Image (spheres, rainbow, N blue to C red):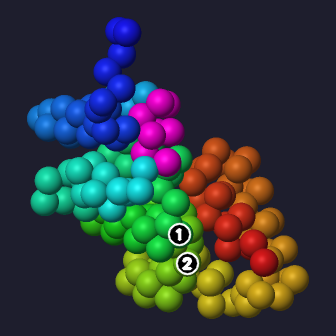
Amino acid sequence: QGSNNSANPYDTILKQTSSTLEREKEVYDTAASAAFLSALMSDSQGRLLDACRPKNEKFNWESARSVGIPFWARSEKVISSIAEEIAQSIYKTTKSVMDCALYYVASRKMKTLKAIAATDRSDSGTKFMKFLLAHDFSSDRGRKAAEKNAYSLLRKRKYASAAAFFLIAEP
């Protein structure tokens, strides 16, 4: 009887998360897959998210990935709000609409994405804004244009931007 069965099922992820996020450097370890499974099956996902959140900060992609939130969060509303937090964090850091586009599209915040694109004066930002205004993505023509741009970005190895265009093209 070498295992401790009396512990809460999410103790592992809480311990590993707190030790990971308390480090001073921005180096994130990942939690074990068993911890992800425990978190997935937990009825206390809200408390888990609070415990995983970096202190006084919004989630960034590295911190959300390190604790596996995309694998175990079940609520679409929660996933959408975390994706929006990640997008805000990325935009705050890079000031590039293309860098945060994937997360705004994934959180279905197209109006916010268009507003940010309107303020981005970079070449890629203005092209993206023109593209968003020129196409209706509920039509076949608009979806095909988004897919064409996605494949072009894949050839240029801009994977996050390509993924954003593929999601825009999704019916």
Q: Amino acid at mark 2?
A: Arg
- The reply to whether dot 1 and dot 2 touch (C-beta < 8 Å) is no
What secondary structure prevails in the magenta region? helix
Residue at image x 62%, y 90%?
Answer: 133
Residue at image x 57%, y 54%?
Answer: 160
Question: Callout 2: helix, strand or loop?
Answer: loop
**Screen quadrant of the N terminus:** top left
**Residue 112's spot in the image, x, y percent?**
44, 84
**Screen quadrant of the C terminus:** bottom right
Q: Nearer the viewer, residue 39 or 138?
A: 39
**Residue 105's spot in the image, x, y percent?**
56, 72
Q: Nearer the viewer, residue 59 or 101?
A: 59
Answer above or below: position of 93 versus 67: below
Question: Callout 1: helix, strand or loop?
Answer: helix
Residue marked by disc 2: 108
Q: CA distance from mark 1 to mark 2?
A: 11 Å
Please provide the residue range marked out in magenta: 33-41
